[in-house]
Structures are given as C-alpha cells and as structure tokens.
Image: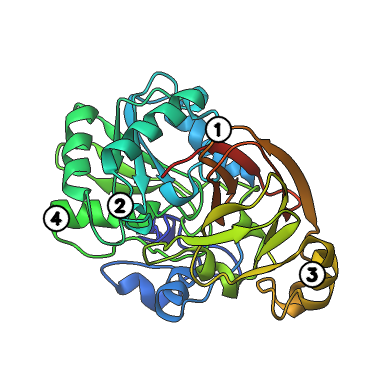
Amino acid sequence: MTEEQFVCIGCGVKIQTEHPDELGYAPESALQKEQIICQRCFRLKNYNEIQDVSLTDDDFLKILHSIGDTNALVVKIVDIFDFNGSWLSGLQRFVGGNPILLVGNKADILPKSVKRQKLTNWMKREAKELGLNAVDVFLISSARGQGIPEVTEAIEEYRNGQDVYVVGCTNVGKSTFINRIIKEVTGEKDVITTSHFPGTTLDLIEIPLDDGSALYDTPGIINHHQMAHFVDKKDLKLLSPKKEIKPKVFQLNESQTLFFGGLARLDYVSGGRTSLTCYVPAEIAIHRTKLENADELYERHAGDMLTPPRKDQLGSFPELTAHEFTIKDDKTDIVFSGLGWVTVNEGNKKVTAYAPKGVNVTLRSSLI
C-alpha cells in the first residue's frame, strides 16, 4: 500500500512522510496505527498548538462547487451567537438543487430567557431574507450534545439514501457536530480534530454510512469579516464563549461611550437617558466613559485596560472604523460580527458603533 492512500482521520488531508514542514506530514511509525493522524492534528489534539496552513479561499470554493455536481443533502451549520457573521453567502448557488438543512449551533450560549420556538422562527425568517430556503431548521449545542438525536433523525429522513455534506464557515462547531453524530450512530468518540482555531479541517473527510453512502465534513470557509481574524490566537477562546451569556444592562446618558475590551466601541450620541443591554462573552470587559474622553482613553489604554488586542499586537491591529446609525424602532440589536450584540430598548436614538476595519456591524430586530 503506498502512503498516497493514507488520509488523516482528523482533518482529511493526504498523509506524506517526507516533508515535516508541509501539510499532511506524519512520521513513518504513524502509518502502523489503526487510526492515522497527521502531526498537525496530533499537536492540536494533545498540546492545543496550531500550525498555519496554506489553503486559499479558492480551495474552499472548489470543494463547495463539487457538491453541486452530486445528489446529496447539505447540512449548513451556523453559530447562533454569531448568526450573520457565520453565514455563508450564496450557498444555494454552489449546491445546485440539493436540499439544505439549517442547523443553529451553540444554542446553550444564549440566555435561557430565549424561547426556542421564537428562535427557530427567527432563523427561518433571517435565512429567507438571506436567500436560503431550508427544508428544516434545528437548534443544537454540539458541545453539550443537545438536540443531536433529533438532527440525526432528520438527516436520515431528508437524505433519502444519498450522501450528506456538512458545510459552514470556520469556528461554527462543524467537526464537533459531526463527532456527536458519529457517536450517536456508532458510539465512537472524537474521530475528527476539533479546536477553537479557525480552519482545523483541511480537506473533505469521508465518514462511510451503513447503506454505502457517506457523510462528508468539509473545510470551514473563512469569513473575513469575523472578529476572530483580528485577534491573537491566544485570545480566540475569549470570543468562543463556553457558558451561557449573561446580559449586562447599562443606563446611559447622551454622549457616553462603552468599550468592549479594545475590540469595539459604542457611542450613545443622542436620544435622552436610555438603557442598553449588552450580550458579549463574560471574558470581554466593558468600560464606560464620557464620549469626550473616549479617543484619549483608547489611545492610552488599548492593549492593557482595554484588551484584547494585546500590547504587542497593536501595530498590526486594524483601526476602529465608525458606523453611524439612527435607531428608529424599539428593541433593535446592534450586531458586532463575532463579538456579540447590544440591544437598544427604545427607538429614536442616535449611536455610532466602532469595530476593526473589515468587521461587519449591522442592525436587526431584537433576537431576545
């Protein structure tokens, strides 16, 4: 058997034993093992170390296009905490006429006060507006295994004996989801490498199903407008909350500012005294100051009191760009892609939101 035929069970990449610095390297001894894993996955699993990889956006698109040439069920995973930021645009275009099942992951992170039915309806509406007609919508938590039996059943029903492709952008919990499905069906644990680093899966990973068809894990597509691309690898876990998000309420007068670490800022410009509810990971500290002092505060304290980013990162961290909004309706969310959102509880308010250049800031009617 030539080494060409070996594939890493953790990330799907072809195994090679010649070049330690290149993708898919594994020492000769690894080829004797029952489950072969490349050195990158080994380090990720055992030491939480990540090696940068050289896959381009075009590589990802080629894989997506290939789905359109097959008859299959497509399972699209989004991060419910970062719905718009983790949305893959134009998926319908790539996958041809194949049916799409929409799965919102990380439901355990949202406050318990969110009614699941309301959330599912909201997902359906948002998906439709973004041009996706899903055959069904599910809410799950891959990390905790919530909702997995129901999704497994639905996949079985909708695939009609055909292959299944699981797609999503980086960091939505795709590989954890597939590991849960495999465990649900076979009892095997953690076949695929998972981490909070974007882009862990490098090529299609094929998991054979009983009837001769297969479940494929596809590489995460990189959404460049997500906050995760601007923070240091060490800080990525701060943006991937593991616990339920607890809302923080601030009573603000006009001309006051909130900083979310050094990653984002919200100026409350005008509209009388009001309350804002912030839904961001607990590890990101929120600082309040007067608008007139905000620029100076950022200048002096970015990288120490206002962190992340870290001090040594400031040189490469993009400047914060302003987005001005007039909030007309009560209960409107200002969404910072990949960081969280702030609910403005009453209408007729003027705000300016700042995020790193390239990160999306959008409005939506309140999720909660």
> Which label lies toward us, 1 or 2?
1
Q: Secondary structure at mark 2?
A: helix
Given the current orientation, which residue lies at the most extreme front position? 272
Residue 20, can we see it? no
Image quadrant holding the N terminus, namely bottom left
Name the image quarter holding residue 251: bottom right
Q: CA distance from mark 2 to mark 3?
A: 42 Å
Precedes in sequence: disc 2 or disc 3:
2
> Which label lies toward us, 2 or 3?
3
Going by the numbered disc 4, the residue's amino acid type is Thr
Q: CA distance from mark 4 to mark 1?
A: 33 Å
Residue in view at x 34 percent, y 39 percent? 119
> Which label lies toward us, 4 or 1?
1
> Which label lies toward us, 4 or 2?
2
Going by the numbered disc 1, the residue's amino acid type is Ser
Residue in view at x 36 percent, y 70 percent? 31
Residue in view at x 42 percent, y 47 percent? 80
Q: CA distance from mark 3 to mark 4?
A: 52 Å
Find residue 186 and name its label.
4
The residue labelled by disc 3 is 298
Neighbourhood count class around disc 2 (C-alpha, 10 Å): few under 14, some 14–19, many 20 upward: many
The residue labelled by disc 1 is 89
Residue in view at x 16 percent, y 47 percent? 149
Q: Position of residue 202 (x, y in %)?
A: 49, 54
> Which label lies toward us, 3 or 4?
3
The residue labelled by disc 2 is 178
Name the image quarter holding residue 258: bottom right
Q: Secondary structure at mark 1?
A: loop
Is 164 on the left or on the right of 251, as rendered? left
Q: Secondary structure at mark 4?
A: helix
Precedes in sequence: disc 4 or disc 2:
2
